[in-house]
Amino acid sequence: MATEYAFPEAGAKTPPAEFETEKMSLSMGPSHPSTHGVLRLQMELDGEVVTSVDPVLGYLHRGDEKIAENMTYNQFVPYTDRLDYLAPLANNMAYAIAVERLANLEVPERCQAIRVITAELARISAHLMGLGAFGIDTGAWTVFMYTFTEREKLYKLFEELTGARFTTSYTRIGGVSRDVPEGWNDRVVAFCDQFLPILEEILSMLTRNKIFMDRTVGIGVITKEEAIAYGLTGPNLRGSGVPMDLRKDKPYSGYEKYDFDVPVGSTGDCYDRYLVRGEEMRQSVRIVKQAIKNFPTGDWYAKDARKIFAPPKSKIMSSMEELIQNFMIVTEGPQMPAGEVYFEAENPKGALGFYVVSKGGGVPWRLKIRSPSFCNLSILPKVCVGAMVSDVVSILGSLDFVMGECDR
């Protein structure tokens, strides 16, 4: 005989005990297209609603910090490429400035301008990739094709400047590896001029797209207080209405000379975080154009840093003194005084910090990396609870993280 159930009364807030079901455990990742890398989310579901999320990290851990303690300062530069591998030029810059502050070394204005230009181009490149992937996550494939095309144009400029497309290793302690090639600045301006109207076209595909708005507006809301409490930085923090930008608040590499705005959101949802990144690309173009318009003359490395920056190759091959100097820098590393320093830069994903402790010599005694993606992902157990499973995909895409930087 079939069991008869009494249906709940109209307006009842909780179902009777006989209608309650067990919660389901679901593992999302570490091999899942929406986790953008080897991130695993151990979720507990009540039907389609997420009741708890436990992010499982470390699948891409390589021990970068311990590696740094067994290498000279310049030898670690290529490892910074592998942090946020979508913006290696910005990583190089942040690390180099940290070590230069340890050495109390000031680089020439031309070097500062080159670093600003490359860092802002890297920001555009990283946001383009993040925006394209976010579009795919929410069902908009065409956006990815547009952003990838523009990113490819940037990679050609990066290759011309650094000799590499992806892992550039361009910065050196005390300068950069080489000066800008003839005509390179003009080609950067040409890219910026043609990029702005294309950016507007890209954003127009999403900003008032009904499906995209349904997937992002009011989804993954992070309040201002929550963003601060969980240590969020970068576009994720500004999307929640906190106007903190290290380029404005703690200027470095001459950022105080440039006129640009800091976009902030009002709601703190996935849609706000998208809008902030779109506007940041416009502002990066604005900074690049200013830097090239007022591009300084002079040296692109600190000539007075004899025990830190390697001499030019032409002098190495013609002068015994420069040959010995180069040999000592390569074998023993740039000579640093004893001390400690912490520096963080406004990277595309947020505040990338390097804490360096030196006991003197060419190798750091301790190096700690403050990775913004790691801190940004800490909000997942808070922001995903109460969302639908499909909303988790939108939330992950809006946070725009990189696991190489998160796990280190």
Image: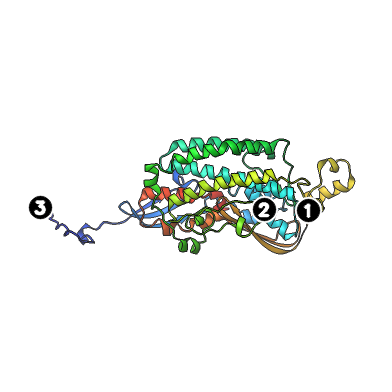
- Whichever of labels 3 and 1 marks the residue nearer the N terminus, that label is 3
Kindly identify the residue that appears in the image at 45 percent across and 40 percent down. Answer: 204
What amino acid is labelled 1 in the image? Ile
Dot 3 alpha-carbon crowd within 10 angstroms: few under 14, some 14 to 19, many 20 or more: few
Q: Which residue is mark 1?
A: 308
- Cα gap from disc 1 to disc 2, whole angstroms: 27 Å
100 or 335: which is nearer to us?
100
As displayed, is residue 283 above or below residue 23? Answer: above
Dot 2 alpha-carbon crowd within 10 angstroms: few under 14, some 14 to 19, many 20 or more: few
As displayed, is residue 42 above or below residue 199? Answer: below
Q: Which residue is mark 2?
A: 257
What amino acid is labelled 3 in the image? Met
**Is residue 146 toward the left or the right of residue 154 in the image?**
left
Disc 3 vs disc 2: which is toward the camera? 2
Q: Quadrant of residue 104?
A: bottom right
Disc 3 vs disc 1: which is toward the camera? 1
Mark 3 in CB contact with mark 2 (< 8 angstroms): no
Q: In the image, residue 146 lies at what x, y percent?
A: 50, 36
Q: Quadrant of residue 10?
A: bottom left
Q: Secondary structure at mark 1?
A: loop
193 or 10: which is nearer to us?
193
What amino acid is labelled 2 in the image? Lys
Q: Secondary structure at mark 2?
A: helix
- Cα gap from disc 3 to disc 1, whole angstroms: 87 Å
- Whichever of labels 3 and 2 marks the residue nearer the N terminus, that label is 3
Disc 1 vs disc 2: which is toward the camera? 2
> In the image as oriented, which residue stretches furthest toward the left?
1
Q: Which mark is residue 1?
A: 3
Q: In the image, residue 317 lies at what x, y percent?
A: 86, 40
